[in-house]
Amino acid sequence: MSDDPRWTCPTCKVTVNTPFCARCGEEPLTPRDLTLRGLAEKLFHALTSIDARAVRSARKLVCRPGALTLAWTSGARRSYVAPFQLFLIANVIFFALQSLIGENVFSSSLDSHLHHQDWSDLARSLVARRLEASNTSIEQYAPAFDRAVVLNAKSLILMMTVPFALLLPLTFVRERRPFMTHVAFSLHLYTFLLLLFCIALLVAKFSGMLGVGGLDAPMVDDVLSAANLAACVVYIYMAIGPVYGATGKLRAAKALLLALAVGAIVLGYRFVVFLITLYGT
């Protein structure tokens, strides 16, 4: 066997003297790579690498607010999952847990929209017009609406990150951060919120098992909403320090403002999902 370390990169078509191609990252193909055992090893390495990066990213996201955004925007990306991918992972975990427990955070039944939301008066008027136009009774329409609203809440959840990302450059106009910093910060914040809502779902389920009630109980809903808002304020306060250099009383004021904006965006999202479902079903 030859000890010559040189090989030809199949992508760049150049001779390489190192274990990896400096241009594209390719590595030389060995006979083992084309065996079933070799393919299984590659698959195992890929899966464990993704899992390790996801766990590392989640730990940094939760334990060191703002550090993950700072790492990603500074170019330290190989050790972490990209913001959008991490958001999708949290999204899958959240909605899987939500389906398992049987509680809904971002979607509400038609009955809830008609009688228990801040926009119920408007909802009753819009639904009445919709039913009249389609010549359908509410008994026939409600089951189809309830199924569709859950699907829409899952598929459109990324929408919430957009207005928050647009709000950040207005809040930190003097810092002049690249817009992708705001996008990454927004994705990381909503990833944290999805994980936080997972805890809230478990608490609500445990509360229901104790006979106190789940999210449908006003007291439980109010307590969890207040706790989530407080956690959001603390998280944002801790995160905007390293990412935006915020300090002092202004830092606290901006954290509170942004947390209130998050709450408003969540409510707005639920109303938008209601409208999309109403006119799409």
Image (cartoon, grey):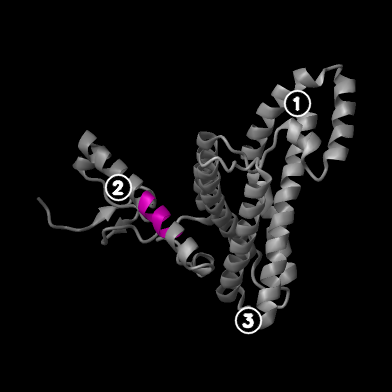
Q: At 61% across and 71% down in the image, what residue appears?
A: 237
Name the element at disc 3.
loop
Q: At 25% across and 53% down in the image, what residue appears?
A: 7
Toward the viewer: 249 or 11? 249
The reply to whether residue 175 is in sight is no
Task: Return the disc, 1 or 2, that comes first in the chain's sequence.
Answer: 2
For the stretch drawn in magenta, the main secondary structure is helix
Q: Please, what is the three-letter code of the amino acid marked with disc 3?
A: Thr
Toward the viewer: 22 or 88? 88
Please tell me how crowded label 2 is: few (under 14), some (14-19), or many (20+) other residues with Cα within 10 Å: few
Between disc 1 and disc 2, the foreground one is 1
Toward the viewer: 97 or 170? 97
Residue assigned mark 2: 45
Q: Which residues are magenta?
A: 51-57
**Seen in the image, is 234 located left or right of residue 277?**
left
Look at the picture and state if 65 lies above or below 152: below
Look at the picture and state if 44 lies above or below 245: above
Q: At 77% across and 40% down in the image, what residue appears?
A: 116
Residue assigned mark 1: 281
Q: CA distance from mark 3 to mark 2?
A: 43 Å
Q: Is residue 203 magenta?
A: no
